[in-house]
Structures are given as structure tokens and as C-alpha cells.
Image (cartoon, helix red, strand yellow):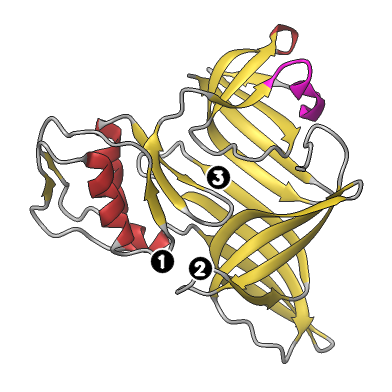
């Protein structure tokens, strides 16, 4: 069985601590009050994800920065499933105290954060003839804790000289753009090097429109709307619209998402014509 995301279900939330070595849960974060995840693929070299988590805990309870993963425990009828939503490095951004209770506003950084800080050597370049997907994956794997996988591959047809002071992430994106490739981070925090998708991860037709909320807006080539959660949709994913009356008619590339965790998951999504 599997959850039918087009129909009703109930959800509870938990945030697990994640061991950097095994990439598996190793405890729970207590006192979680709210969770918001931002996904953005619109920059030149995006880190793709960030998060904000609010927690309340006893003042004496220590908070240790580290990797954390958001899970949705979903129940639909007699079936239940634990779904990983996002994995990020969580650190304290702001804290306050009242009557022995501490409230923390925690800031979550992408699993690509280490690659955004690490620098390539001066004069570094990608050599004509190498597999660009493999090269980008090896560059990332050398400096991030998250697992990196490769789907497919492509051969570079020219040398790519990296700009002075480039981060590993900027260099990896420069290589991937040559081959029409992208990065995708799933809920488990695993990074995939893959071609830009050409098949839809989400179809908004009469059946799929069950998850679409009223109020589709279009502005300067960008379409924004809100919908309920559907798994497997990330920045660069393809969304196929078959609802001419709503303004969604054709294939669109996801640029940004905002996930708000409540009784379900509300997704505010922006797309552009693919």
C-alpha cells in the first residue's frame, strides 16, 4: 500500500537528529512548534534549501547544532507511513527565556552548505572530454556529509575554467549547466546529480486538481499557486498542467517552493514555462 495524496490523511510531525557519519536518525528534537522549509532553484548556483524551526524547551535543556531531518508521520485509514520531508543543518538563530522556558528560533541550512564554503584551487578547471556528471558528484562528495548519487552522465566538450575564488558548489553548477544537468535533494537529504527532468513529477489535471487551492496567479512569466503536498516535486521538477481555465496549461519548471507544516503540508509554488 501507499498513501493516496489526492485524498484525506492525518499528519503528525517530528524532527530527528541525524548522525553525520551514518546519515541515519540518532535521537529526537523536543518541543518543536513550527516548521517551514524554503526551496529555491532560481539563483545561479543555488543551495536549494533552507528552513526555519521554532522550538520551546526547558531553559536547562541544551541545544546542539547539527544535522536534523523532518518527518511527517502520515495516517490514512488503516495505513501509516513515515515520510522524510527535508534534511538540514540546524543552528540557533535567536533565543529568548521566560519563567524557566527557552524559545529558540532555529535556522536550517542546506546539505550543500559545506560545498558553498569550500573553495576550489586558483586556476582550477574542468577538462574537455571528462564525464561532467561524475566530476561534479566527486567535487561535492569530497566536502559534504550527504550521500551523492549520479543519474546518467555527459561528456564536456570544452574546458571550463572556474572563476577565481569560486566555491565548490559554484564550480559544480558551472559544470552541470554545460550538460543540462541539475542537483536534486530529497527528503532524506540525499543529493542526486541528474539531467533536467523531461517527464512530469506532478500532473495537475481534473484528478490532480484535488490538491490545488484556489487562487492561481500569473506575473511576468511566473505562475504561483498553493497546493497540498505531493511527494517527489522539487526545484527543477516538471509540473504538467491540464487546467486551461485556471491558467495552468502545459509544462512548467518549478523554481521555488515554500513548505509549511501544519495539519498537512501546504506548498506555495512558483513555476515557469519549461
Residue position marked by numbered label 3 in the rendering: 39
Q: Quadrant of the N terminus?
A: top right
Crowdedness near tag 2: few (<14), some (14–19) or many (≥20) residues, C-alpha within 10 Å: some
Q: Position of residue 139 (x, y in %)?
A: 26, 55
| Residue 145 circle label | 1
Q: Residue beneath label 2, please?
A: 23
**Element under disc 2:** loop
Q: Earlier in the sequence, mark 1 or mark 3?
A: 3
**Which residue is at 31% across, 56% downward?**
140
* Snapshot quadrant of residue 220: top right
* Quadrant in the rendering for residue 122: bottom left
For the residue pair 75 and 248, the one nearer the viewer reads as: 75
Q: Is residue 215 visible?
A: no
Residue 129 within the segment the image draws in magenta:
no
Q: In the image, which is nearer the foreground, mark 1 or mark 3?
A: 1
Image coordinates for residue 38, horizontal then vertical, percent: 59, 48
Distance (Cα) linking label 3 and label 2: 21 Å
2 and 1 marks in contact (CB < 8 Å) = yes
Label 2 vs label 1: CA separation? 8 Å
Please tell me which residue is depicted at 81% across the width and 25% down the height of the picture: 210
Q: Which residues are magenta?
A: 204-214
Q: Which residue shows up at 39% across the image and 50% down it?
A: 149
Of badges 3 and 2, nearer the viewer stands: 2
Whole-angstrom CA distance, mark 1 to mark 3, is 19 Å
Amino acid at each position: 500500500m501507499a498513501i493516496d495524496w489526492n485524498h484525506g490523511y492525518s499528519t503528525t510531525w517530528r524532527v530527528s537528529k541525524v548522525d553525520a557519519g551514518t546519515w541515519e536518525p540518532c535521537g529526537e528534537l523536543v518541543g518543536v512548534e513550527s516548521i517551514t522549509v524554503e526551496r529555491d532553484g532560481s539563483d545561479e548556483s543555488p543551495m536549494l534549501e533552507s528552513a526555519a524551526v521554532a522550538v520551546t524547551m526547558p531553559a536547562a535543556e541544551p541545544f546542539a547544532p547539527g544535522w536534523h531531518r523532518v518527518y511527517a508521520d502520515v495516517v490514512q485509514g488503516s495505513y501509516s507511513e513515515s515520510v522524510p520531508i527535508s534534511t538540514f543543518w540546524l543552528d540557533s538563530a535567536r533565543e529568548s527565556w521566560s519563567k524557566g522556558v527557552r524559545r529558540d528560533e532555529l535556522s536550517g541550512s542546506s546539505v550543500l552548505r559545506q560545498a558553498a564554503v569550500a573553495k576550489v584551487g586558483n586556476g582550477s578547471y574542468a577538462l574537455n572530454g571528462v564525464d561532467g556528471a561524475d566530476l561534479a558528484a566527486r567535487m561535492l562528495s569530497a566536502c559534504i556529509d550527504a550521500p551523492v548519487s549520479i543519474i546518467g552522465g555527459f561528456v564536456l566538450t570544452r574546458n571550463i575554467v572556474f572563476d577565481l575564488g569560486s566555491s565548490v558548489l559554484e564550480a559544480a553548477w558551472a559544470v552541470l549547466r554545460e550538460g543540462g544537468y541539475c542537483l536534486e535533494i530529497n527528503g532524506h537529504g540525499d543529493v542526486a546529480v541528474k539531467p533536467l527532468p523531461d517527464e512530469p513529477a506532478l500532473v495537475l489535471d481534473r484528478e490532480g486538481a484535488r490538491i490545488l487551492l484556489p487562487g492561481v496567479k500569473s506575473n511576468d512569466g511566473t505562475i504561483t499557486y498553493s497546493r497540498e503536498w505531493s511527494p517527489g516535486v522539487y526545484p527543477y521538477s516538471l509540473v504538467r498542467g491540464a487546467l486551461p481555465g485556471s491558467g495552468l496549461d502545459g509544462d512548467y519548471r518549478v523554481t521555488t517552493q515554500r513548505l509549511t507544516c501544519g495539519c498537512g503540508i501546504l506548498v506555495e509554488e512558483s513555476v515557469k514555462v519549461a
